[in-house]
Image: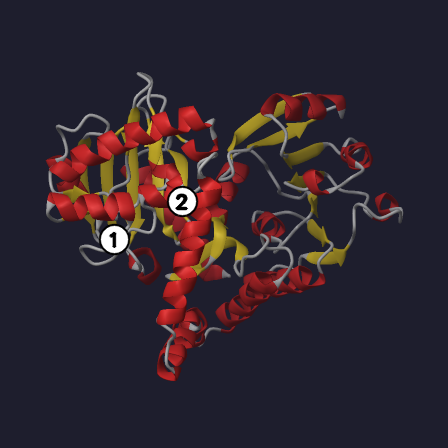
Amino acid sequence: MERYSKEQEEWDRFIRDSIGQNAVLVSVSKFSSDCRVYRVNDSIFKIRRFTPSSMRGRNNSFEDECLVMRQLSAVTGTPAVRGYKRMDRWEQLELELLPELHGYDPTFGMPHETFKDFWSVIAVTLQINRLGCSHGDLHWRNVGRNVKGGISVFDFDQACLASPWRCVMRDLFGFGTCERRSEFSLFNRLRYVQGVGVLLRAMVRLTKDVLAFLSRPHSSSLQRSRFAKSTFMQRVMLQEDLALKTLAEAWSIAARSKASAPDTDIAYYSIDIGGINFPGERPWILRWERIRKNLDFKGKRLLELGCNMGLLSIHAKLSGAAFCLGVDTDKDILLAANLASRAFGTNVEHRPVDLGDSFRWEEELNGFDIVSALSVLHWIEDKERVWSFISKHKEVLYEGHESEQEAEDNLRKAGFIHIVPLGTTERNRQMFYASRM
C-alpha cells in the first residue's frame, strides 16, 4: 500500500529533521498512530500529525496542554515544559524527562504498599486540583515513581480547568466536568486493590446494573448506538479505496476472532492509514519501530509463529524479505491475515498450524532464515519442543512471559550468541533479537 509507506517515510523525515536521528520512540497512542512520544537525551517530545484519528476523543491540543502545565509549574511531581511548536500539519511539545520515571500499576502491589502509593497520587492530584486543574486521565501509565521515591503525574492532554471542587470530583470519583467525565478516576483504580477489590467491584457492578435498568434506551437511542459503533466502517467505505475496504474487513474479522484477548471485541493491533484508525488493543507501530532498527529482512525467509493478523510478515515483505509464512491455530485470524496481506499488496502465505499438536509440524516448517515467536510459548504446553525447533534457525525474534533473565538464558541454551534487547512491549515484557553470529 503506497499511501502507508509514504506516511511512514513522512514520519521518519519529520523526526530526523525536527528532533534528530537519536530519537527513541517511547510510546504510541493506541487510538491513533499519529500521536507519538519520543525521548532525546533529557527531554521528552510529544508529537502529533494532525489527522481525523489523532484529534478524535481528545480535549486538548498539545498547545492547550502546554498552557495548562505552565500553570502547574510550582507543583512537585509534574514535569517542566520546555517548549511548544506548531509546524503546518504537525505540533510538538517538549517536556523535562523525569529521571528513572517508569509507568507502573500500583494496584498489583501488596495492600499496604498500594494504599501508600494511592495516598501519594492523591496528594499530587489535590495539589493540581487546588490550582483549578483536573488531570482527567489518571491511568497507571500516566503515573510513575521518580528517583527520590516520590510519585509523579504526567500526560495532561485530557486536562481541563474548572473550580477546585469540580476538579476533585472529576479526578477522584470520575464525576463529569468540562466536556467529558474522567474514565480513569482514582476510585476506578481503587476497585482493583487487593483486600478491598472484591467488595468494591460488587458495589460498582450492582450500581451499574441498577443504572442500566433505570436508563433503558428507547429504540431511537439503540439505533444511534449501532450507528456510533459502525462509524469506523462507514468512514472507510466513504474513502472509495478498495485496499482500505479490504483492510477494514480484515480488522472486523480479527475483532471477532478467538485470537483477540478474552471478552474483548477488538483486534490485537491498531494501525493508522490515511488518517483512519483501525482500532486494536495495542499500537503496532511501537513494536515495529523497535524491530526494524535491529533486523535486516532483505532477501531473507521469515517464519512467523502465532502470526495473528500477520503484520510482522507484511512489514518484513515491505522491507525486502524474499518470502514470509505466518502460522496460527485460529482460522478466522488467518482469513483476516490473508485480507490484510492483500490490502498491503504483499503475497504473504498463511497456514493453520497448532504448535501443540502431535503432528510433526517441524518437518513442514523448514528452510527459514528468521523465526519469530512473539508471546507464543506461554500458551504451549510442550515448550521444549518449540525451543528445539527455534534453535535450528540462524536468527530469532522473541518475546516471552518469563523474566528478562530467564528469556536470555533460554536463548543461550538454544545456541544463540548475539542477544539484543529491543525494549519492553506495551505489556512490560522484553523483546529480543538473537542470532548465532
Quarter placement of the C terminus: top right
- Disc 1 packing (10 Å; few <14; some 14–19; many ≥20): some
Residue at image coords 16%, 39%: 129
Q: Position of residue 128 (x, y in %)?
A: 17, 36
Q: Locate residue 218: give its quadrant.
A: bottom left
- Disc 2 packing (10 Å; few <14; some 14–19; many ≥20): many
Q: Secondary structure at mark 2?
A: strand
- The colour scheme used here is secondary structure
- The answer to whether residue 371 of the structure is visible from this angle is no
Q: Nearer the viewer, mark 2 or mark 1?
A: 1
Q: Where 66 sits versus 415, above or below?
A: below
- Mark 1 or mark 2, which is nearer the start of the sequence? 2
Q: Where 238 sits versus 111, above or below?
A: below
Front one among 231 and 288: 231
The numbered disc on residue 44 is none
Front one among 117 and 346: 117
Q: Where 142 sits versus 284, above or below?
A: above
* Amino acid beneath label 1: Phe
Residue at which label 2 appears: 28
Q: Locate residue 251: give its quadrant.
A: bottom right
Q: Position of residue 32 (x, y in %)?
A: 38, 54
The numbered disc on residue 175 is 1
Q: Secondary structure at mark 1?
A: loop
Q: Position of residue 314 (x, y in %)?
A: 60, 53
Q: Is residue 203 left or right of residue 85?
A: right
Measured in 3D between alpha carbons, the distance from the residue under mark 2 to the one under mark 1, in whole angstroms, is 28 Å
* Amino acid beneath label 2: Val
Residue at image coords 57%, 52%: 318
